[in-house]
Image: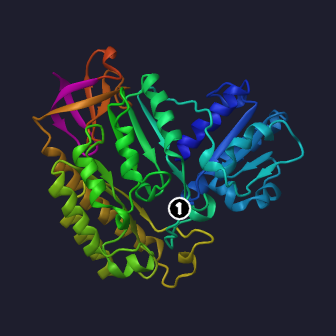
Amino acid sequence: MNMYDSEKMAGILLEEGYALTDESQKADLIVFNTCSIRQKAEQKFKSELGRAKYLKKTNPSLKIAVAGCIAQQQGRAMLKKYPNIDYVLGPQNIHKLKDALKTDITKIFVEENPEVQYMDLPVLRKESVAAWVSIMYGCDNFCSYCIVPYTRGRERSRPSKNIYTEVYRLASDGFKEVTLLGQNVNSYRSDMDFVGLLKLLNTVEGIERIRFVTSHPRDLSDSLITCIKELPRVCEHIHLPLQSGSDRILKLMNRGYTFDHYIKKIERLRKEVPEIAITTDIISGFPSETEADHKATIDALKTIEFDGIFAFSFSPRPGTPALEMEGRLPDDVKSQRLYEILDIQDEITTNKNMKFKGTIQEILVEGVSKTDSDKLSGRTRGNKIVNFRADNSCAGRLVSVEIVKVMRHSLEGKAI
């Protein structure tokens, strides 16, 4: 979602006569679009800001803007702490970047924006095959570890006609895939629900694939599962964050479901869509997590056998209830448990990927591989990365590829 916001800010700046540069020493403006969901992201931002401070000493006319969740969270305090920053913009106010550049009076834009869901901003997309499209903003779930409701605000859904228009334009521009973005797409509500929106977008000619992130397990409906099964453009992949296999920890996280509730959703998904790929999020070392709680998560991984996971150690976030919880675990314990989770999942992912060897998969070619410039890269409908040799003219096309080699995080193939 932050990457999509960055594309929108780039689009705004393009209309103002700016051009992108990869050389920061040549920039007239540097925009940091920040994330505060984990402490590591904040540390990386501070490190980059230190480099920009040096650039400003050599180029006093350089302007520095900070956008995103750290900007929203710290607000005016950021200007006081870092006087080299010129502008501070929260996620709901990135459209004001244009105004900020034209004034030396107002430097901070973090107020509530009740119209954010109705604003259609220009977007400068880096890719030409697959695009992100926001369908909603904010979150109402208030998981005890998460900063999003406090930085991105309460949940608001974009009108379906605005989303349809954006996707229609993308198809007209040659894009083949869209990923619908929301903190909890299952709770999308405007003039229709999320299932209705998927059915509407499935009618857009030229769009070959529709993906969406993220789904909340509590709100995953049978009708959405039926959509994945029946709508030809909706891909057989779902990201369904579990976070923990322990009911006690799930309750402390305020997730709103038990492991039994979650696994029944998994069983329903696999019954209706046997070929579906399922990925998830896991947090290790949540406050007061015992060895038994950790083992419950390990058992959950072995039972469910996800196609892949995003796993992180618990990171306390200012302003969240989890920050005040007792039983904070030492970093070495959190790290050890995280390594165990990752090791087990690596074996599961490799074994699941082995099932693809010798099969023929439909690949949407995205372009040159990031790991081998002599190869093209694309994804299966289940979101598996596949690298293979083919003519560059295949970019943006659906290609049949035989899988000949399996790695942990990608597949190798040959075009048929």
| Snapshot quadrant of residue 313 | bottom left
- Residue 411 is covered by the magenta coloring: yes
At label 1, counting other C-alpha atoms closer than 10 Å, the crowd grade (few under 14, some 14-19, many 20 or more) is: many
Question: Which of the two residues, 287 or 361, is positioned nearer the viewer here?
Answer: 361
Left or right position of 329 against 305:
right
Indicate the colouring scheme.
rainbow
The image shows residue 144, relative to residue 266, as above or below, that is below
Extreme residue in the left direction: 358
Q: Does residue 305 appear in the picture of this structure?
A: no
Question: Which of the two residues, 95 or 329, is positioned nearer the viewer here?
Answer: 95
Q: Main secondary structure of the magenta part?
A: strand
The image shows residue 317, relative to residue 72, as above or below, that is below
Residue beneath disc 1: 139
Q: Name the residue located 45 percent from the left edge and 75 percent from the top edge.
A: 254
The residues colored magenta run 398-416
Extreme residue in the front direction: 191
The kind of residue on which mark 1 rests is Cys
Q: How far across and how far down the image is residue 250, in percent?
A: 38, 76
Q: How far across and how far down the image is residue 148, in percent?
A: 56, 61
Q: How far across and how far down the image is residue 296, in percent?
A: 27, 76
Instruction: Name the quadrant of the C terminus.
Output: top left
